[in-house]
Amino acid sequence: SSIATESYLVLGALAQRLPLLHSVEQLSKQDMGLSGIQVETWSWSHAVPMVDLALSWLCLNDIPYVCLLISGQSKNILEGSYFALVISSVLGMLDSILERISPDSTHDGKSYCLPWIPDFVPKIGLGVITNGFFNFLDDNAVELEQHTSFHGSSLVQGLFHLRSQGNVDTSLCSISCFQRLLQLSCSIDRVIQNATTNCTEHLKESKTGIAGRILEQGICNFWRNNLLDMLTSLLPMISSQWSILQNIEMFGRGGPAPGVGFGWGAYGGGFWSLNFLLAQLDSHFVLELMKILSTGPEGLVTVNKSVNPIVQEGNNVTDSVAITSERISSVLSVSLMAGPGQISTLEKAFDILFHPSVLKFLKSSVLDSHMKLAKAFEWDITEDEYLHFSSVLNSHFRSRWLVIKKKHSDEFTRNNNGTNVPKIPETLETIQEETELAEAVNPPCSVLAVEWAHQRLPLPVHWILSAVCCIDDPKANLSTSYAVDVSKAGLFFLLGLEAISAAPCLHAPLVWKMHALSASIRSSMDLLLEDRSRDIFHALQELYGLHLDRLCQKYDSAHSVKKEGSASVDEEKVTRTEVLRFQEKIHANYTTFVESLIEQFAAVSYGDALFGRQVAIYLHRSVEPTIRLAAWNALSNAYVLELLPPLDKCVGDVQGYLEPLEDDEGILESYAKSWTSGALDKAFQRDAMSFTVARHHLSGFVFQCSGSGKVRNKLVKSLIRCYGQKRHHEDMLKGFVLQGIAQDSQRNDEVSRRFEIMKDACEMNSSLLAEVRRLKTSIDR
């Protein structure tokens, strides 16, 4: 079996070098065995006998091990998988032959009528139909139910049995055979459908009878129920392979060689393991299935209307929304498994994901979802807008992730080096005109065809956020209007994925989602000027605020358990990763981004509520101290602390900004500096969150924490000295002293205790003590 497998793999590779059967060059040659002297091709005169030999392998009943596999009586699973691999190589070789008769894609994306086709094409089709590869059970084909050759077990069922065994080797054999069978069926349908009415008599004769009518109408059409069953069975397998991917994502990018590549040493073997190879083959097959099932104007959503009810414990339940949501999540998962050299896989995934019908489904899911929207959406999306969203999203993600990274241009290098290099005149390459079915691209078979350097694959888990940030990407060289359209479409797409709880979207770190929202408004406020994008932006803020609250609760519980000395592995993971570590996760110089964002906020926002909410996130206690300090200083220096919203209007729960009490001395000193400089005066008048946060943390540090006495004394002195110079700060300082004191019988005792702390901090300075006594008198009134 191994010799046969290798032989047909070689023949399949040679078949890819066949000239196009109906190309102008081929038709002009009388002898089909001749080819260009300098062209590395295979001869059709040699290929046709090989096809006749391969047809004998389609008679599955003549192969004992395959018969046992189909009937489910095979005791030697490994031997059956080996013969399944032989069948896979044969099917692959036949598919390569048909590809050279009628290519799946041409240089202009069109299909052409074939003046004639070889006699072996219908033989291949009939061989697949009549030899038990799958069951043709269709509700509309009543005659088939009485035809015995279409009943009983099939190769598809035997392959499913192999795939469900859990053994990696047998699973690889089965999924490979699945994929080749599906590709061959599509190729047969394509060649038959492109054949003109002037084709050979053999083709006309083959279209008689039940098998002939199946051949004429299309194998995949009659195989639809089998395809749906396959898809339903494989989707849980795709979801279960997430753990492999997540472990690989924990490791950095290395190089093309095993041992240096992705996830080397990871649990499950990493990028070069058989487990990951199986996950990739599964993902490719799922995409092929979805591509076939989603043909039509409504794309993937069409599948929901024709799918049979799901049987769950005796109850027939039809839930098209859940089915479509699961399939969208699966396509997203598949996109994360594509590695270098698999750009075509991602192109198929993008075509499915960004189809207008999927965008319509996401919009309806947003309206019907369980998310608590701040307000009901009063806008709608037109058909033209769906088409536009589909176009800009597909174009953006292809150009952002599927294009090889390039070095800086020569002009950029010259400018940096300060040297004048003479420009080389650029000329346009001559485009040779070809007739209808000319050879578009037939690259030489080389092991170096795949370029590993400068690639962007596999995609990071947060790749879906790049469209939202498109408006803030200076390297994209896009027009402002187009970049805004991409970001609007990206916001809409992101909210739709959140509404259906798409698994990859849920696994994207919250810190990246928060950063994406900030990046979308850093360079321009255009997104917030349109009602629809503004509503979507607000909804995402609310959603991520709830997520942030949940993460903070996990962090607090894990932190408290860790103090008791019994923290679990999962809880320790929460403490390490599930906080807003912008500097650690996004970029080491993230403070520069925050400063530029606040500069934009001060320049053009005019106190916009949504913009202010986004800026206030960087003052949240889950954010790194360096980022909080940079954000506060930028706001204070620009004198826009008063433009921030009230604390109860910010993203997330109020306690997230107040607890735990601030212990970073640099941040506390910045709070005090803003207080004494007058930067918080208007914030106090407008009840902005900036003053509430500063007052809470300063009061907590002075009166409740056992921190550095030197720092505490310094803070108290500066506040009292400012109070003595600015009488209008009296109410502000009263709030500082009374912060957090309950109105009960012990209130007076707590107030007295705090004044004693303030007196001690004055260190016997008579002028400061006088101001403290005056403040106490004002409070006691």
Image: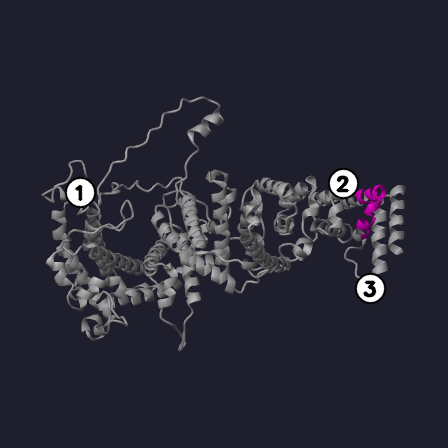
Q: Which residues are magenta?
A: 718-734
Q: Main secondary structure of the magenta part?
A: helix
In reply to whether residue 694 is colored magenta, the answer given is no
Q: Give the left or right position of residue 674, taking residue 781 as reference.
A: left
Residue 290 on image: x %, y % = 35, 59
Residue 458 on image: x %, y % = 41, 48
Question: Can I make out residue 749 in this image?
Answer: yes
For mark 2, what is the residue?
677
Which residue corresponds to the image point at 54% horizontal and 43% vertical from the top-left?
A: 587
Display coloring: one colour
Q: The N terminus lies in which quarter of the figure?
A: bottom left
Q: CA distance from mark 1 to mark 3?
A: 97 Å
Q: Is residue 318 above or below residue 181?
A: below
Q: Is residue 480 above or below residue 538?
A: above
For mark 3, what is the residue?
744
Q: The C terminus lies in which quarter of the figure?
A: bottom right
Q: Quadrant of residue 522?
A: top right
